[in-house]
Image (tube, coloured by chain):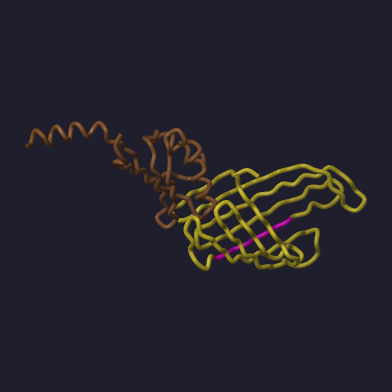
Amino acid sequence: MAILKRWNLTNAQVNFYSWAGAGWSRFGNNDAISALVGSQFDAESRRLYFNSQVQVLLHPNAENTWMTRISGGIAPYLANAGEIQGMMIVQAFHNTAIPGPWVIGPMIRMYYKSILLEVGSGFRGEWMLNLMTTF
Amino acid sequence: MKKVIVWMVLFYFPATVFAEKYSLEIEGMVCDFCAQGITKKLNKEFKDQDIKDVHVDLNSKRVTFDSKKVDEKKLRELIKASGYNLKSVDVQQEVTGTK
């Protein structure tokens, strides 16, 4: 993932990312080299959060799969540096490989120092847990 | 009496140790991740300047620290490379002790 552009505002940060990769995938009995290309736009202040993400899986022997995610959140309180910051987020997912409407699910994000923890529902409504840290 | 005071000041002044107290106003800091990233970079890059007491205040969008004099151009480049905008730098000299 590479950041293409960042706008630093007085009370917010706006980012535009993109990524690309290649790998091996199987659709039915078709194995082939496939590629994943995506981009993300997000805007975040200490109080509000918005994220939109779209990525496409390019597969030579099957229809391309488009995956879209839009999320928005609000912080119930403003934490300072060194305090636990919480963000309540609602996400909407869509995947063209999975028939059906958009799936909507909640997520809670917590920041503390170099740790980011996300707990919520995944694409099929299952539990999702993300833990990220920086060194 | 005046001469005594003047001589005392002249004697004392060279033995006084000064440190710079920096206060940086930074745009784009919105969470503890940002604060940690900037703190780590400052501590690493200005280790030779005896940087200490790095403190981030997200309310005022300020990062403060004590150190020996640092190159302001290098400071700006460091904050920019970290992904943020350095809006202003305030430097105050303070007496930290005597030799």
Residue A70 lies left or right of residue A7; in this view the side is right
Residue A74 lies left or right of residue A57; in this view the side is left
Which residue shows up at 36% across the image and 35% down it? B69
| Residue stretch rendered in magenta on the structure | A67-74
Chain B rendering hue: brown
Chain A rendering hue: yellow
Residue B54 lies left or right of residue A87; in this view the side is left
Q: Is residue A73 magenta?
A: yes
Residue B25 lies left or right of residue A45; in this view the side is left
Q: How many marks?
A: 0
Q: Give residue A40's position: percent from left, percent from top.
A: 63, 52
Q: Quadrant of residue A117?
A: bottom right
Q: Nearer the viewer, residue A7 or A48?
A: A48
Q: Quadrant of the N terminus of chain B?
A: top left
Which residue shows up at 42% across the image and 37% down it? B50
Q: Nearer the viewer, residue A46 or B91?
A: B91
Which residue shows up at 93% across the image and 50% down it? A29
Which residue shows up at 74% across the image and 62% down it? A123
Q: Give residue A41's position: percent from left, percent from top.
A: 60, 53
* Vertical order, A122 against B82 (above or below): below
Q: Nearer the viewer, residue B45 or A39?
A: B45
Q: Give residue A31's position: percent from left, percent from top.
A: 89, 46
Q: Quadrant of the C terminus of chain B?
A: top left
Q: Give residue A95's position: percent from left, percent from top.
A: 75, 59
Q: Nearer the viewer, residue A105 or B24?
A: B24
Spot the residue most to the left. Answer: B1
> Is the magenta region chiefly helix, strand or loop?
strand
Q: Is residue A88 magenta?
A: no
